[in-house]
Image: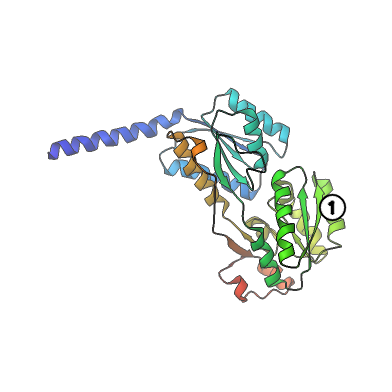
Amino acid sequence: MKRLGIAILLLSTMAMGQEVKNSNKIKIGITQIMEHQALDLARVGFEKALKENGYEEVQIDYQNAQGDFNTSQMIANSFVQNKKDLIYAISTPSAQSAYNATKEIPILITAVTDQKAAGLTGENITGTSDATPISKQLETIIKILPKTKKIGIIYNTSEQNSQVQVANAKEESKKLGLEIIEVGATNINEVAMGLDSLLEKVDVLYTPTDNLVVSATPLVLDKANKKNIPVIGCIEDQVVQGALITNTIDYEKLGYQTGKIAIKVLEGEEAKNIPVETLKDTQIIVNKKMAEKYKVDLTTEALKGAKIY
């Protein structure tokens, strides 16, 4: 019996080794709309999940659209033509491009705020959403900056993801007695002009998880800080760069979670049977220098457990 047990163990080990070895036949296309910390970390987390779960030999084809939707569509089409086994789409525009290109290849999405509003509800789509209650950000603002009455939001009008966030902000702000003043933009020049107008009218500037605006963070911070308008970011890197605070999720963890879902699909589970998931935990992150500039008390109960830079 002992020899039989050893033989079974050896066969099992060999089978597992063969499974990992054969993972080099799996072709995954990763499409990302542009480079910024949140999206980059989502990719890092995804690849980490694959490597840590026996899929370190997969063939990954990473493509970045550099902010251009037409390029994003070309990338998605090329993935279909090259018969990828799975497409990992980071951001709403990337996911929309992938879904436009195929209704058959499984698409794993992430960094998408509202997949239904973005039309991403096909049978070959699942993954994760970076949706976090906008109420958390607004409540944080009034706790640390109680004199706030008017909150400015600048966003890309061509991103469905951003339109949803602005609508949610307007709805939630009414409950807290706040006024949202919005300005739309479609490119970096319009962001600059929009800020010049917006910053004259608000007490605080809030930046949603908008790829155009996040990529323009240095510009946003420069203009806002010169006007002494605190910036509430949407990701950690913005706080590192000089935004006052954010209450956000960990995008590497989000990508890792998406990677675990991708493994389920690669092992035979149908995407349509896997609901889109979110990360429930958020983290308050504060820039100490900006907190001093805007006289925010770092010892207040509202910032208990916050990560301080």
Residue 211 showing in the rendered view: yes
**Residue drawn 47% across and 43% down?**
260
The image quadrant where one finds the C terminus is bottom right
Residue 20: quarter of image: top left
Residue 196 spot, x, y in % from top left: 86, 56
What amino acid type should be assigned to the residue bearing mark 1? Answer: Gly
* Left or right: where 211 falls relative to 193: left
**Residue drawn 55% across and 24% down?**
83
Disc count in the image? Answer: 1
Closest to the observer: 25 or 271? 271
Residue 105 spot, x, y in % from top left: 55, 29
Closest to the observer: 23 or 121? 121
Q: Residues within 10 Å of mark 1 (few under 14, many from 20)?
A: some
Closest to the observer: 295 or 304? 304
Residue 259 spot, x, y in % from top left: 50, 42
**Residue drawn 50% across and 47% down?**
257
Give the image's coloring scheme: rainbow
**Residue drawn 37% across and 32% down?**
19
The image quadrant where one finds the N terminus is top left
Q: Is residue 178 above or below residue 190?
A: below
* Left or right: where 179 falls relative to 280: right
Residue 231 showing in the rendered view: no
Residue for badge 1:
194
Residue 136 spot, x, y in % from top left: 64, 63
